[in-house]
Image (spheres, grey):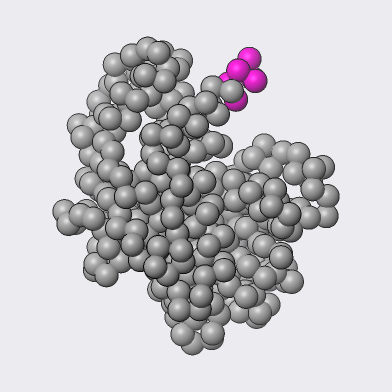
C-alpha cells in the first residue's frame, strides 16, 4: 500500500512514517520543515530505498499537494502548525496552514481518488467544559485559534465525505507524547520539557498551579489508531473519534514520576497559566473502540518510562 504522511518530519508524522516503513509499506512524506526536523527522517532513504519518498513542500501550495497525493491510497494528514500558544501569537499563519492547507489536501485527495484520509484532529476542540469524560457527542467549544482551526478541519472532512464521497475519519488526539518530541521549541509539550530539564538539573516550568489534568496518549497508541482508521468499516467514515488512554494525570503527578526515573528532584518554578489552555481533560474512548477497533496497548506510566529512556539514550548519544 502507498501512504502519504503530511507533516512526516514532525513528531507524530515521523513516528508514523517509521512504523509504516517497518511494516513493509511504501511512504511518501510531505513537509515544509517549518517545524519538522530532517533528523527525524535520517537514514530512512538509505534503509528503505524506493519505499520512502520525501517531497519538500507546503500544504498552502495546491499544486505541490496534488503532486504529493498522486498515486496514493491512504493519507495520514498530520501536517499542521501545532501549539495553542503559537496560534494565539500568530492566528493568520496558523489558519493558512491548518485550515487552507487542509482544504488543499482534501481537494488533491479527492481528485487523485485516494481511498481514505485520516486527519489529526485535536481534543482542544472541546474547550474548557467541566464535564468529564469528553465525548464526541458534546458540543465543541474551542478556546483558541488552534482549536477552532482543528475543528474546522473536522467539518471539512465530514463535508468532503458527504458531498464528494471521499472517505475520511478524524482522530481527536489527546496530548500525544513520546520519542522525537521536541523539548527545545518555545511551544514544547510538557513531557519532553519536564524530562530534559529535570535530567539537566534545571527547574522545570509549570504554568498555573500544576494540578490541571490531561489524558496523555503515548505515540504507539496513536500509530495504532491511524492504521486502524485506514482499515475501519465504511460506517466510520465522516466521523470523529477520541484517541487517548482514558487516564487522567496532573502535571505535578508527571513531575513526581520523572523525579523517580531521573533519580533526583528539581523543584519547579511556577508561572501564570497560559491563554487558551484548558483546565482538565479526560477522554471517553468507547466510540473509537466501536467504530475503528481502537484499543490502546501502552498505558501512561509505561509510555512515560519509554519516553524517558529514549531521551536519555539520545542525549548520551550526543555527548
Quarter of the image that includes the C terminus: top right
Marker count (numbered) = 0
Is residue 296 toward the left or the right of residue 65 in the image?
Answer: left
Vertical arrangement, residue 50 with respect to residue 305, above or below:
below
46, 268: nearer the viewer: 46
Quarter of the image that includes the N terminus: bottom right
Residue 109 locus on image (x, y percent) = 62, 74
| Type of secondary structure dominating the magenta stretch | helix
Residue name at image x 73 percent, y 54 percent: 24
Vertical arrangement, residue 201 with respect to residue 92, above or below:
above
Vertical arrangement, residue 29 with respect to residue 196, above or below:
below
Residue name at image x 30 percent, y 54 percent: 283
Residue name at image x 50 percent, y 78 percent: 234
- Residue 296 falls within the magenta-colored stretch: no
- Residue 317 falls within the magenta-colored stretch: yes
Residue 214 locus on image (x, y percent) = 30, 44
Residue name at image x 62 percent, y 75 percent: 115
Residue 26 locus on image (x, y percent) = 74, 58
Residue 27 locus on image (x, y percent) = 71, 57
Numbered range of the magenta stretch: 314-319
Amino acid at each position: 500500500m502507498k501512504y502519504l504522511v503530511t507533516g512526516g518530519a514532525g513528531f507524530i508524522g515521523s513516528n508514523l512514517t517509521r512504523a509504516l516503513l517497518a511494516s513493509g509499506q511504501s511512504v511518501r512524506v510531505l513537509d515544509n520543515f517549518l517545524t519538522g526536523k530532517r533528523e527525524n527522517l535520517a537514514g530512512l532513504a538509505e534503509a528503505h530505498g524506493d519505499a520512502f519518498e520525501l517531497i519538500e513542500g507546503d500544504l498552502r501550495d495546491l499544486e505541490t499537494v496534488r503532486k504529493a497525493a498522486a498515486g496514493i491510497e491512504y493519507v495520514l494528514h498530520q501536517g499542521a502548525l501545532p501549539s495553542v500558544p503559537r496560534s494565539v501569537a500568530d492566528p493568520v499563519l496558523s489558519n493558512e496552514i491548518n485550515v487552507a492547507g487542509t482544504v488543499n489536501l482534501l481537494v488533491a485527495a479527492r481528485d487523485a481518488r485516494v481511498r481514505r484520509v485520516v486527519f489529526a484532529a485535536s481534543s482542544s476542540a472541546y474547550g474548557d467544559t467541566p464535564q468529564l469524560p469528553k465525548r464526541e457527542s458534546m458540543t465543541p467549544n474551542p478556546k483558541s485559534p488552534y482549536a477552532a482551526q482543528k475543528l474546522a478541519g473536522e467539518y471539512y472532512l465530514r463535508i468532503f465525505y458527504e458531498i464528494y464521497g471521499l472517505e475520511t475519519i478524524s482522530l481527536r488526539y489527546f496530548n500525544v507524547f513520546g520519542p522525537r518530541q521536541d523539548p527545545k521549541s518555545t511551544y514544547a509539550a510538557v513531557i519532553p520539557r519536564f524530562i530534559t530539564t529535570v535530567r539537566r538539573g534545571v527547574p522545570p516550568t509549570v504554568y498555573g498551579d500544576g494540578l490541571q489534568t490531561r489524558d496523555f496518549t503515548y505515540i504507539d497508541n496513536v500509530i495504532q489508531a491511524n492504521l486502524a482508521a485506514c482499515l475501519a468499516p465504511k460506517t466510520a467514515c465522516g466521523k470523529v473519534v477520541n484517541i487517548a488512554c482514558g487516564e487522567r494525570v496532573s502535571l505535578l503527578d508527571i513531575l513526581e514520576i520523572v523525579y523517580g526515573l531521573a533519580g533526583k528532584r528539581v523543584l519547579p518554578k511556577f508561572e501564570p497559566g497560559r491563554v487558551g489552555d484548558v483546565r482538565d481533560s479526560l477522554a471517553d474512548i468507547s466510540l473509537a473502540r466501536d467504530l475503528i477497533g481502537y484499543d490502546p496497548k501502552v498505558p501512561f506510566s509505561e509510555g512515560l518510562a519509554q519516553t524517558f529512556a529514549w531521551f536519555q539514550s539520545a542525549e548520551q548519544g550526543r555527548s
